[in-house]
Image: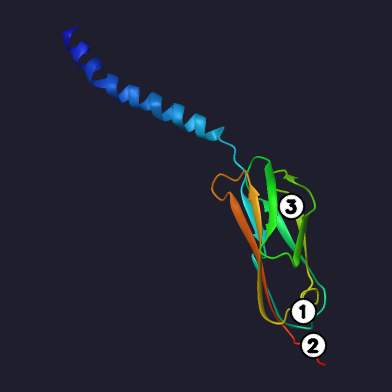
Amino acid sequence: MHIMQIKLSRLRPILYLLVLLVAGLLSSCNNKTPQISIQPPLQDLGTQPQQLIDLVFEVRNTGNADLVIEKVSVSCECTTAELEKSTIPPGESAELRVKFDPAEDNLFGEIQRIIYLRSNDPNQPEAEAEFRATIQKPEG
């Protein structure tokens, strides 16, 4: 009986750790989070005339919970961005439509614009879509 008590007292910490490990594994299985992915993250448009440019990016939820886009903003007022829907279920995507009008402010030369998407993705709360272009100077 005494030997059995000694063995049980040695096993107790091991059993306790096993219970904690199993509980941790079970709780991590229920940990659902969204994950944002923007494709392509960068569009290099090369040389473009000074006219309206329309672009489309794909915003995908690669996580296992609903991705909620809380805010879409742009780095310049000459650029507009509109997301097809603000809640994206797991495995689905939405179009991000971007318009850039360099003629509005007579912009030319090397141009870089960034679109910011704030979301509930805990690992990447603000994601970016970017485009670059060289806008030709208008003649005359």
Q: Identify the residue at image location x=54%, y=48%.
A: 123
| Mark 3–mark 1 distance (CA, rounded to whole Å) | 34 Å
26 with respect to 110 (left or right): left
Q: For numbered disc 2, what is the local secondary structure?
A: loop
Check whether the beta carbons of the residues at disc 1 and disc 2 lie within 8 A of each other: yes
- Residue labelled with disc 2: 138
Q: For numbered disc 3, what is the local secondary structure?
A: strand
Front residue of 93/84: it is 84
Tag nearer the camera, 2 or 3: 2
Q: Residues within 10 Å of mark 1 (few under 14, many from 20)?
A: few
| Residue 68 percent location from the top left of the image | 69, 43
1 with respect to 44 (left or right): left
42 with respect to 3 (left or right): right
- Residue labelled with disc 3: 93
Q: Earlier in the sequence, mark 1 or mark 2?
A: 1
- Residue labelled with disc 1: 106
| Mark 1–mark 2 distance (CA, rounded to whole Å) | 9 Å
Q: Earlier in the sequence, mark 3 or mark 1?
A: 3
